[in-house]
Amino acid sequence: MNYSITLQDFPEIPEDTRIKAEDQYRRALEKALGGPDEVVPAYRAWLSVSESGNDQLSKEEMAQATRWQRASDLARQAGFRTLGESPEAYFEFKPGR
């Protein structure tokens, strides 16, 4: 499955620095979730939890959603490691169609 990750609302930085941060985020996310094929399903499970609540999902979906949350936190740390923090900045994740 394909997806995109873009750094948003970070003060002016060189394009190569932005690309490196996005790549660090992507690699950390994939590593934490067990590979690129696990990323979109975990994201969709997390999205389902956030939209519908816990009572309508299976234990497997809940586990995937929890894995997404942990993995995205680790990926955020990895992506900002060389940039430093910026309160408004974030990494936007968009699953492909």
Image (cartoon, rainbow, N blue to C red):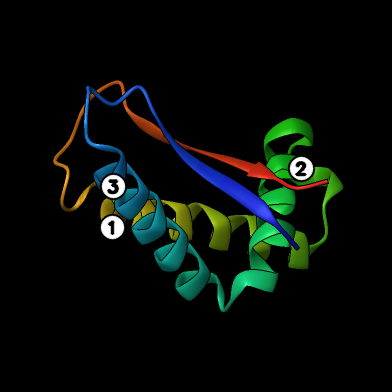
Q: Nearer the viewer, residue 34 or 26?
A: 26
Disc 1: which residue? 78
Disc 2: which residue? 48
Disc 3: which residue? 16
Most distant residue in the bottom direction: 34
Crowding near the residue tagged with mark 1, few <14, some 14–19, many ≥20 C-alpha atoms within 10 Å: many
Residue 7: where, in percent of width, then height? 40, 36
Looking at the rendering, which quadrant does residue 60 occupy?
bottom right
Relative side of 48 to 11, left or right:
right
- CB-based contact (under 8 Å), mark 2 and mark 1: no
Amino acid type, residue under disc 2 in the picture:
Ser
Rendered residue at 28%/26% (across/down): 10
Residue 61: where, in percent of width, then height? 75, 60
Amino acid type, residue under disc 1 in the picture:
Ala
Marks 1/3: CA distance?
16 Å
Q: Earlier in the sequence, mark 2 or mark 3?
A: 3
